[in-house]
Amino acid sequence: MASFRDLLAEVKREIREIEPAAADARRADAIFLDVREADEYEQGAIPGAMHLPRGFLEVQVEGRIVDKSAPIVVYCAGGTRSAFAAKSLADLGYVDVVSMAGGFNRWKDEGLNWQTPVVLTSDQRNRYQRHLLLPEVSESGQQRLLASKVLLLGAGGLGSPAALYLAAAGVGTIGIVDMDVVDASNLQRQILHNMDRIGERKVDSAKKALTAMNPDVNVITYDMRIGADNIVDLFQDYDLVVDGTDNFPTRYLVNDASLVTRTPVVHGSIFRFEGQATVFNPYVGPCYRCIVPEPPPPELAPSCSEAGVLGVRCGIIG
């Protein structure tokens, strides 16, 4: 019966190994795959490495690394687990896989670059588990969400569902601009608010709802009207703006501030049973003025209070 040493020797005959210095030279073009356990990874890792513990490798790697021709450098602490991982990857059809001899311990001993990664807490891993399972998001994407800042213009019909899903997704900072109060007629579609908050400032009601949903989120409120004197300063503090405003002068103002600050705007609008959503990415695609050079006559663009609106349409667009 073969011993562990026999198995390891056999595996090493079937795979390729490279020294840490040679691995370092491949950092520009190869995927570095860290197969250590979470507690090991949290103590330090190679910058930019993808973390996938050895125990989950065969189950998850094809979702995380779709291109089986991509060059992969696998490492663990000392080079043993990475050897077995390299063999499994080859068996799964990955064609350019090497194991790093000596692992991360030797990498550090040779003075190569490493860092202590920013990791999610156990509570965050549990909260965002369904995101972490998506290769397009994973832990690095979730960390980007937690570090991102989104400004919502309006805490009404469109802003309500947008705010709730941004908070649920773990967007770290959400700014909300609104100068209105909660009215009973809002509750048919403005799901941030409830009966107990009728008469409250909408920004205060929104903050209560979002922080109750997700304590990770920092909600910044702006109980004011946006105008030419403040909008540029507002936009400069955020990565993205969600425009749920309901009048054309403000939409043009938002467009112009977006161009000045180069801040992308996600725009939504609704009319009765209809709605549209558009992304305006400054100097990459058309702007709002390109699509709507002049506002339509007021009688063709009545407000919700004049024309009515199906509540769920706000949810779909928002």
Image: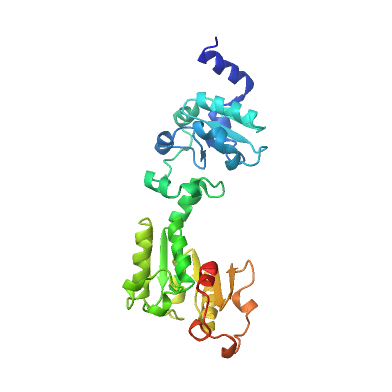
* Residue 263 visible in image: no
Q: How many callouts does the rendering have? A: 0
**211 vs 279, nearest the viewer:** 211
Q: Residue at x 47, y 30 (%)?
A: 104
Q: Position of residue 274 (x, y in %)?
A: 59, 75
Q: Position of residue 3 (x, y in %)?
A: 52, 12
The color scheme shown is rainbow
Above or below, 111 relative to 214: above
| Image quadrant occupied by the N terminus | top right
* Res 187 quadrant in image: bottom left
Q: Residue furthest top?
A: 1
* Residue 69 visible in image: yes
Above or below, 273 relative to 62: below
Left or right side of 173 for 272: right
**64 vs 290, nearest the viewer:** 64
Above or below, 80 relative to 108: above
Q: Position of residue 179 (x, y in %)?
A: 38, 79
Q: Residue at x 62, y 18 (%)?
A: 13
* Res 202 quadrant in image: bottom left
Q: Position of residue 315 (x, y in %)?
A: 51, 68
**15 vs 181, nearest the viewer:** 181
